[in-house]
Amino acid sequence: MPHHITTICITGATGNVGLETLRAVLTMNLDAIVDTSDRKQRAKARIIALSQSPRDAAHTIGMQEVEYRALDMTNIDAAHHAAAFQGVEVLFLMRPPQISDVQTFLVPLITSAEQAGVRHVVFLSLYGVESQQRTPHYAIEQLLRKSRMKWTFLRPSFFMQNLTTTHRKEIAEHNEIFIPAGEGKTNFIDARDVGIAAATILLDPEKHINTAYNLTGTRSYAYSEVADILSKELGRTIQYTNPTKFSFFWRKAVQERVPLMFVLVMLYLYHLTVAGKADGYAPDLERLLGRPPTSFEDFVQRNKNFW
């Protein structure tokens, strides 16, 4: 029988989860076959990475086995979408943090993907999204449910990588965790684990049709505990300052000039943390990985140099 190569497309390919997904797909993409005279390997899938600048993405990612295409999710032109999704069968979809207007930007994109022949979408959603109907993630899930495409939803808890990206500077330069989360507990998850889980699904989507997975780590932490772990591993005192919402808004939006919408999203997420919505456990990630998820302590040890 001829060997059919599925075309997998990954959005946000230079981001935390997108890049880890791309790496995992490439690692898992070789399928050993036996020739009459020799053992050979063949690819299960053709891999396409989408980003605003394919040239920059190719330089950043540095993977020759990948095809790089342009996709600007703020560009709602149908021809732009069609070029990005041409020939794609399985799509890994991420919503850029700066895009919250689902009707304007995501509706035409999802419509174009369906028209281009995408048959399965793996969407990076949000833990607890079913009870957070005001979030863009919820609206996107509903769009995918109503489409003719098959879908899989990955609903991760809070990424450990937020501490090495969004909150890296305050930890590295000020020895503090400046987050208005009270003593609410957060279940942290490693983006590398999410990328492996996503790759597992992308390479064998038929086993995960119309399924939602809640992805969490094995335990939850208050930010005071996070500060203690960082202090121990880094050999210096890291304080959890727990600012008021107003203080957080003023410093982020006014002093640091973080985009307003992103600051508001952070305030909303930390409000959920205070309310206990970021705490929880599900076994789905462990089942997809075939091993326990990465612990927060192991993550900190692996990433000491960031702080």
Image (cartoon, helix red, strand yellow):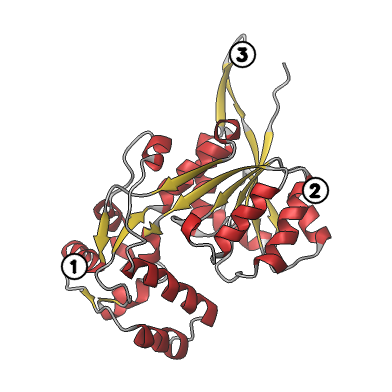
Image point (31%, 40%), residue name: 292
Q: Which amino acid does the dot numbered 2 rest on?
A: Gln
The 10 Å Cα crowd at callout 1, few under 14, some 14 to 19, many 20 or more, is some
Q: Which residue is mark 3?
A: 35
Image point (33%, 48%), residue name: 281
The 10 Å Cα crowd at callout 2, few under 14, some 14 to 19, many 20 or more, is some
Circle 3: element type? loop
Figure quadrant of the N terminus: top right
The answer to whether residue 84 of the structure is visible from this angle is no
Q: Position of residue 232 (x, y in %)?
A: 16, 63
Q: Which residue is mark 2?
A: 115
- Please give left or right for residue 179 compared with residue 114 in the image: left
- Please give left or right for residue 256 compared with residue 306 in the image: right
Q: Nearer the viewer, mark 3 or mark 1?
A: 1
Q: Position of residue 62 (x, y in %)?
A: 57, 52
The numbered mark, 2 or 3, whose residue comes first in the sequence reads 3
